Image: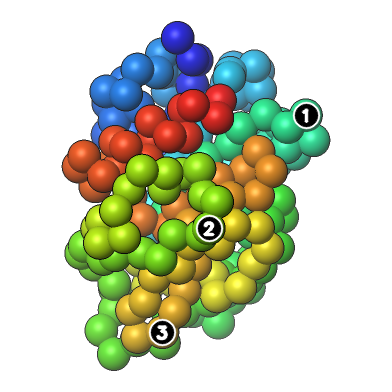
């Protein structure tokens, strides 16, 4: 059984992420312990709320060192929602620019959409060769709640649209990330988490 740590840094849907991962067969621990996060087979970085606040919480648990070391050692990391956004270089919210963890290239910016937040179910255009979306139909819907997004990055980029195209998910080396919430996306989210677990 794969050992997965959901990183507790004061933000995120920790228990729902834990339950969703347990549903697909992972042995899950929710903890702020950097050594446990470093040693797990897979690390999940959740997140809700503001980019800067999440980064402040991550700094308290030495997350940058842990994530950097995992990426350098080719050990899987999964970011969810703001947990995806903080993996990028920078985030801009309310005119304030904050530094991210910097393991993915790109900037998080406000969506140009008539209605924000983007809240509800949406389809995605999965990247060719994606392991996260393997076996999922093109009309599969996932649950989004966000007002900010990344528009350009490197790797296998899965896109979605709300007012404009944005990055819905990205896979680059050991790093996977979703702007939507797989733990709130029912059977589709479970299938995606199962796919991720197979990479762990």
In depth, the one of 54 and 106 nearer the eye is 106
Residue 138: quarter of image: bottom left
For label 3, the crowd category at 10 Å Cα-Cα, with few meaning under 14, some 14 to 19 and many 20 or more, is few
Q: CA distance from mark 3 to mark 2?
A: 21 Å
- Of 130 and 187, the residue lying toward us: 130
Indicate the position of residue 155 as horizontal and vertical percent values: 65, 58
Residue 145 placement: quadrant: bottom left
Q: Residue furthest bottom?
A: 114
Q: Residue at x 61, y 73 (%)?
A: 152
| Quadrant location of the N terminus in the rendered image | top left
**Which disc is residue 189 wearing?**
none
Q: Earlier in the sequence, mark 3 or mark 2?
A: 2
Mark identifier at residue 164: 3
Residue under the image location 66 percent in, 23 percent down: 38
Q: Give the CA distance from mark 3 to mark 1.
A: 35 Å
Residue 73 numbered mark, or none: 1
Residue corresponding to mark 2: 128
The x, y position of residue 188, in whole percent, is: 26, 44
Residue 150 x/y as whole percent: 54, 70
Q: Is residue 152 above or below residue 54?
A: below
Which element type, helix, strand or loop, lies under badge 1?
A: loop
Residue at x 64%, y 16% (from the top left corner): 39
Measuring 29% from the left and 65% from the top, which residue is drawn there? 123
């Amino acid at each position: 059984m794969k050992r997965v740590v959901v990183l507790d840094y004061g933000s995120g849907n920790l228990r729902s992420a834990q339950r969703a991962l347990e549903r697909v067969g992972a042995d899950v621990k929710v903890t702020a312990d950097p050594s446990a996060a470093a040693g797990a087979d897979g690390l999940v970085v959740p997140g809700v709320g503001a980019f800067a606040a999440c980064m402040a919480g991550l700094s308290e648990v030495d997350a940058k060192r842990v994530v950097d070391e995992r990426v350098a050692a080719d050990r899987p990391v999964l970011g969810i929602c703001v947990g995806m956004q903080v993996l990028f270089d920078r985030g801009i919210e309310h005119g304030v620019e904050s530094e991210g963890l910097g393991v993915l290239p790109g900037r998080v910016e406000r969506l140009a959409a008539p209605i924000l937040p983007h809240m509800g179910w949406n389809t995605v255009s999965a990247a060719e060769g994606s392991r996260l979306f393997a076996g999922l139909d093109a009309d599969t819907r996932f649950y989004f709640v966000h007002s900010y997004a990344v528009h350009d990055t490197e790797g296998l980029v899965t896109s979605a649209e709300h007012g404009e195209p944005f990055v819905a998910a990205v896979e680059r080396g050991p790093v996977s990330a979703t702007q939507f919430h797989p733990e709130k996306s029912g059977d589709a989210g479970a299938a995606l988490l199962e796919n991720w677990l197979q990479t762990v």
